[in-house]
Amino acid sequence: MPFGKERITPVFKLQTDESLDQANPVQNQWYPIMDAKNNVRLLVCRVSIETTSEDIEVRWTIDGITLSQTQAAAVAGTAYFLYKWFSGSALVFTTSNSLALQYTFLECRSAKVEIRKTTNNGSGNLKGNVTYAQMV
């Protein structure tokens, strides 16, 4: 490092959670939980639906790469947490927030998180929550 120049270490600042509580969701329509954000560290993604036996799909767009996963026959009111598997492009659903938190967070230049239901078994609310930090 040259004399007289400071190196500034980037810091990720925790942001207010992004949330969705969509009443009467339409089958196969994507709803954004977190719209495109820059310089993001994704910490936790949680989704649920208030109708039993709906299939819910979550899509993450990370630096232009799309990752998606479906939870078949979701249980009404159950919180499903998602994390990125270590290798490949798989997202993984779990009902254990402690398991999801054991996996590393995901840092990226841009991130978008969306959800939809792919079945039409009822009109229960579709919910999502993303906890994240942004570089300052």
Image: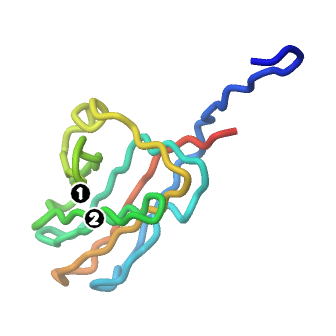
* Residue ID at (53%, 48%): 17
| Sequence-wise first label, 1 or 2 | 2
Crowding at label 2, few (<14), some or many (≥20) Cα neighbours within 10 Å? some
What residue would you read off at disc 2?
68
| Image height of 116 relative to 120, above or below | above
Instruction: Locate residue 17 relative to residue 53 in the image: left or right.
Output: right
**Which type of secondary structure does the marked residue at label 1 adopt?**
loop
Residue 1: image location, x then y, percent: 74, 18
* Residue ID at (27%, 80%): 123
* Residue ID at (38%, 59%): 128
Disc assigned to residue 14: none
Disc assigned to residue 77: 1
User: Which of the two discs, 1 and 2, sits closer to the camera?
Assistant: 2
Seen as rendered, the residue at the extreme right is 4
Q: Nearer the viewer, residue 90 or 6?
A: 6
Give the quadrant of the C terminus. Answer: top right
**Which type of secondary structure does the marked residue at label 2 adopt?**
strand
